[in-house]
Image (spheres, helix red, strand yellow):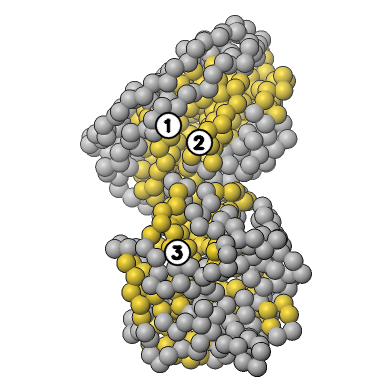
Amino acid sequence: MRARARLTTFFALVSSVALLACNDSPPTSPRRISVGAGIPEAGPLSLHSPIAGALSPTAPAAGAMSGSTPDARMLTGSASSNAFAGSGLPMRMIWQNTSSGDRSIWLMTGISWSGGYTSLPQVPTAWSIAGAGDFNADGRPDIVWQNTTTGERSIWFMAGASWNGTYALLPEVSTQWSIAGVGDFNADAKPDLVWQNTNTGERSIWFMNGSTWNGAYALLPQVSTQWSIAAVADFNSDGKPDIVWQNTNTGERSIWFMNGSTWTGSYALLPTEPTAWKIAAAADFDTDNKPDLVWQNTSTGERSIWYMNGSTWNGGYALLPTVSTQWSIAGAFARGSGWTTEAPMPTPRYLAAAGVVNGILYVAGGITTGGSSVATLEAYDPSTNTWTTKRSMPSARAGAVAGVVNGILYVASGDFKTTVDAYDPATDTWTTKTGTPTPIVRTYVTGSVLNGVLYVTGGILPAGSGSNPPTAVLEAYDPATNTWSTKAAMPTARELATAAAINGILYVAGGSSSTGNVSTVEAYNPATNTWTTKASLPIARSAAASTVLNGLVYVVGGYASNLVTTVESYDPTTNSWTERASTPSNRGYAAGGVVNGIFYLAGGTDSGFGTVATLEAYQQ
């Protein structure tokens, strides 16, 4: 059907919404009844594609922040017998309440809701979310909106789970057409839009150039209007998105296997389910690189995730919390791999120490602009992309090491201090520990926590004879007894090294010795109190950051002959290094930590040795 151009005026609607009550009816999950008897029966190619009128005059105009998020009160049913074994992929589940204009994004860890969410600005109920995809190539999915009353469509550009305030207008299209899915159907690494006309049975794909329609399209076979497109994902692992169909009159579901924008003629039948259950999204929740199906029952408020083995349900599922039927799932997406830039720290600084407690990244101390050490403590919440200033440390220190034991952040050494400062996030209070015996006086140390003990190694000693010699000392602080013990020294004395702990072993990489930067990697085993030399860093450097992601040790940035953006990962099982996606900016002396499978790198210095507040996030 051809579209008529419309110019409309769009006004924001702001309303306050009370928390929603949840349905407490006996819970169930979609269960197999029978294999679907049919598939969407294809007729000839559709006669038309949505034909664009003028550009939409408006985007969804934001009112106040949404007053609520889907209010989860109980898990639907009992736990699945197919227990989730994945490490947890950071996912986002989009909710919309078309009665109130509230929209929200749940932050998921694998199949489980983390309890964190981001409220999106309220938008008039005539607008609905149609899908998500990365339309501006920044590594973060954006949200596609449609107004089925006016024919206007728009894309909100997102900063993670928050709208960054900018948008792109799409051409107006007849209200008989609706956007049904998002996927890259022409293999240009740019998401395209799938349209359906449920009055005529016509379907079409618009090829997009970022957030702009390039004028080209592909027609899909006409299908009975009883069938609708429910989701888009690659179900046969050929790198091409496939189309999920559902027949809400019969309960039949099916997957069309696509070759780009052309149906191959092949399909897979899914089990027939009661018509009250509907497929809401497709995404990989169990980290097996295969998309799973998200179901919702709009009569009861129950939601569930089916684990898929390609195009076949493997019989396993996960139950989601029951949510009021006023809320519906509008889509699901992974955060996206690679690096993104997030909200900067309030205080620029380098040589800070960092640790993660209950999903919050704490950055303590460091050297700020002007060259002075500070006692500043700031906390970053990834679920809201915001920073909060907390109570300062008892004393300023830089070049320290931090570790978390039993929910307490410990900051040791730095600025030649021998005390340990302990921070309790629950009370926002610090306690200074004077452990015994007194540890070695040093700074520019590294270390990590193993089995509830904070290991501190390397660094430089106080000046003597005009120099600050690097040291190989390894000491262990036990918070349970407030005691220090000396362990076997590192084979290589060095400062500004970086360290990470995995599988009971402490790995120390790089740093600067008395002769310059080193690529040395040494591993300490507390069980035997011994060191082992491992495969060297591909690039010798100091002042790098490190972390552990998915069983690998990452070394990020740092100083070689100059500051670098290099990121390399070490696999302890193969004793080998692999180069990874570089950081967006070159910097060293940064601090960081992992929250829900994402590594956050905060602060540091830039190539001109200027102090920065930059926060960048990496997902493997």
- Asked whether disc 1 touches disc 3, contact meaning CB atoms under 8 Å apart, the reply is no
Find residue 108 and report its horizontal and vertical position in percent.
Answer: 44, 47
Which mark is nearer the camera, 1 or 3?
3
Distance between the alpha carbons at the discs numbered 1 and 2: 8 Å
Q: Mark 3 Cα within 10 Å, few/some/many (few <14, many 20+)?
A: many
Circle 2 — which element?
strand
Distance between the alpha carbons at the discs numbered 3 and 2: 29 Å
Q: Earlier in the sequence, mark 1 or mark 2?
A: 1
Query: Circle 3 sits on which residue?
Result: 376
Residue toward you, 16 or 605 = 605
Q: Earlier in the sequence, mark 3 or mark 2?
A: 2
Q: Quadrant of residue 156?
A: top right
Q: Which quadrant, please, contains the N terminus? A: top right
* Numbered-mark total: 3
Find residue 324 and report its horizontal and vertical position in percent.
Answer: 30, 32
Q: Earlier in the sequence, mark 1 or mark 3?
A: 1
Task: Identify which amino acid the numbered label 3 is placed on.
Answer: Thr
- Asked whether disc 3 touches disc 2, contact meaning CB atoms under 8 Å apart, the reply is no
Query: Circle 2 sits on which residue?
Result: 163
Query: Circle 1 sits on which residue?
Result: 121
Write the residue at 42% across / 90% down. Answer: 438
Task: Identify which amino acid the numbered label 2 is placed on.
Answer: Trp
- Asked whether disc 1 touches disc 2, contact meaning CB atoms under 8 Å apart, the reply is yes
Circle 1 — which element?
loop
Q: Mark 2 Cα within 10 Å, few/some/many (few <14, many 20+)?
A: some
